[in-house]
Image: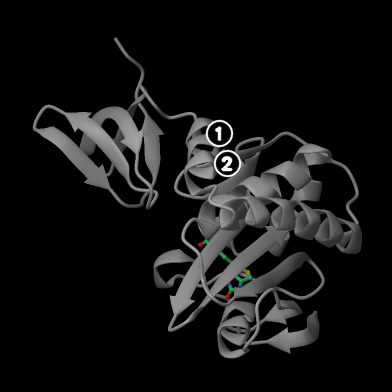
């Protein structure tokens, strides 16, 4: 494991280092990356910011990642997977997962908000982001949490690498709990028919099936 006080992005480091299973952990990231080019708030002392390098890369790391984090957190709180791939506790996002592929490598990057109080988040994030401590009122130890998340991830990656992509995908789809629900994704409203192997939603809309790759979903009550 490579442990740093400060790095630009643990994903960036993991993508540059050769080797399978290398873990890069930092107390602070100066250019933490979120999905779709967004910045990931990674202040020192507050969270777990780490990445695991895979060489060769595997499809489905995003499912293994979410299920592994959910498994580890479930012993402590009611953690749920929220499409497209967040972990939420009591309605707020406590963890983001970013898988990046480059040449013959992949980095599975995980950011878990652990000790934050609401004021520790930038104002624009406060209504959606929370930390394990702010959402549960419990105290968390980052070292113990990291150990448990890595153990759970390891179990999921072993399944993935022994041909378990479809079973992990099925379990992840079930955990997202969206099939058959009517949702609004941007301007598109429809009923979730399926979630594909790349994580995209297929909605049955009045204009036929429509694929949604990412975005905020709002559940619409059936009349
Ligand atoms: C998201 O947008 O929800 C994904 C956020 C992923 C953040 C983690 S923190 C560790 C790793 N290094 C990065 O630069 N990003 C990921």
In the image, is 52 to the left or to the right of 223?
A: right
Q: Relative to residue 14, is residue 90 depicted above or below?
A: above
Q: Determine the residue positioned at 61% across, 69% down.
A: 41
Q: Secondary structure at mark 2?
A: strand
Q: Determine the residue positioned at 67% across, 55% down.
A: 158
Residue 120 in which image quadrant: bottom right
Q: From the top left corner, tell me how far across and down residue 9 is, in percent.
A: 61, 81
In the image, is 166 to the left or to the right of 12?
A: left
Few, some or many C-alpha atoms within 10 Å of disc 2 (few <14, some 14-19, many ≥20)?
Answer: many
Which residue is most to the front? 162
Image quadrant occupied by the C terminus:
top left
Residue 55 in which image quadrant: bottom right
Q: From the top left corner, tell me how far across and down residue 190 is, in percent.
A: 24, 29
Few, some or many C-alpha atoms within 10 Å of disc 1 (few <14, some 14-19, many ≥20)?
Answer: some
For label 2, the residue is 81
For label 1, the residue is 175
Which residue is most to the top? 223
Q: Are marks 1 and 2 in contact (CB under 8 Å)?
A: yes
Q: Determine the residue positioned at 51% across, 31% down.
A: 174
Q: Determine the residue positioned at 78% across, 66% down.
A: 46
Q: From the top left corner, tell me how far across and down residue 118 is, in percent.
A: 71, 54
Q: Relative to residue 166, is residue 182 depicted above or below?
A: above
């Amino acid at each position: 494991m490579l442990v740093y006080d400060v790095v630009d992005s643990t994903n960036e480091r993991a993508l540059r280092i050769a080797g399978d299973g290398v873990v890069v952990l930092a107390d602070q990231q100066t250019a933490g990356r979120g999905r779709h080019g967004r910045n990931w708030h990674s202040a020192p002392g507050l969270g777990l910011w780490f990445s695991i390098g895979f060489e060769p890369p595997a499809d489905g790391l995003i499912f293994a990642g979410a299920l592994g984090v959910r498994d580890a957190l479930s012993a402590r709180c009611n953690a749920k997977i929220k499409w497209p791939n967040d972990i939420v506790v009591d309605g707020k996002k406590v963890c983001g997962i970013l898988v990046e592929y480059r040449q013959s490598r992949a980095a599975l990057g995980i950011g878990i908000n652990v000790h934050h109080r609401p004021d520790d988040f930038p104002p624009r994030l406060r209504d959606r982001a929370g930390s394990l401590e702010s959402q549960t009122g419990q105290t968390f130890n980052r070292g113990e949490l990291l150990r448990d998340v890595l153990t759970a991830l390891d179990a999921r990656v072993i399944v993935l690498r022994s041909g378990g992509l479809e079973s992990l995908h099925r379990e992840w789809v079930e955990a997202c709990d969206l099939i058959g629900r009517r949702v609004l994704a941007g301007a598109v409203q429809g009923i979730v028919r399926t979630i594909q192997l790349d994580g995209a939603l297929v909605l049955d809309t009045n204009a036929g099936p429509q694929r949604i790759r990412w975005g905020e979903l709002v559940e619409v009550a059936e009349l």
